[in-house]
Image (cartoon, grey):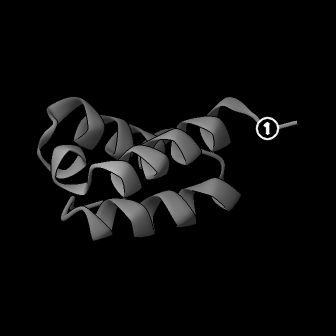
C-alpha cells in the first residue's frame, strides 16, 4: 500500500505528464513538489527532489 507521500508524488507526476506546462506554472503544483522534498521520507525525497528539479524548482 502506498503512503501519502508516494501517492502525492505519483499524482503530481501524472499531472505533469498530462499537462506539463500547467504543472510548471501552477503555484500549488510547485509548492506541493517543494513540500514533498521537505517532508517525504528519504526513499521518496530523492525522487521528489529530482522531479522538483525537472520543474525548475530549487530543492
Question: In this orientation, which residue lies closer to the viewer: 23 or 31?
Answer: 23
| The N terminus: image quadrant | top right
Task: Using the image, determine if residue 29 lies above or below residue 24.
Answer: above
- Answer with left or right where residue 27 lies relative to residue 51: left
Task: Place residue 22 in its image quadrant.
Answer: top left
Quadrant in the rendering for residue 58? bottom left
Q: In this view, does 49 lie to the left or right of 4?
A: left
According to the picture, the residue beneath numbered tag 1 turns out to be: 2
Q: Looking at the figure, which quarter contains the C terminus? A: bottom left
Within-10-Å neighbours for mark 1: few <14, some 14–19, many 20+? few
Q: Residue 50 appears at what percent x and percent y? A: 43, 70
> Which of the 4 image quadrants contains residue 33?
top left
Is 48 left, or right, of 43 in this rendering? left
Q: Tell me what residue is drawn at x 40 percent, y 63 percent.
A: 51
**Which residue sits at x=21%, y=58%?**
57
Residue 53, position in %: x, y? 30, 68
- Residue 11 drawn at (x, y percent): 52, 40
Residue visible at 69% across and 60% down? 43
Amino acid at each position: 500500500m502506498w503512503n501519502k507521500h508516494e501517492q502525492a508524488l505519483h499524482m503530481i507526476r501524472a499531472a505533469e505528464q498530462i499537462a506539463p506546462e500547467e504543472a510548471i506554472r501552477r503555484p500549488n503544483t510547485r509548492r506541493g513538489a517543494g513540500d514533498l522534498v521537505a517532508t517525504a521520507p528519504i526513499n521518496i525525497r530523492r525522487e521528489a527532489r529530482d522531479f522538483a528539479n525537472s520543474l525548475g524548482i530549487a530543492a
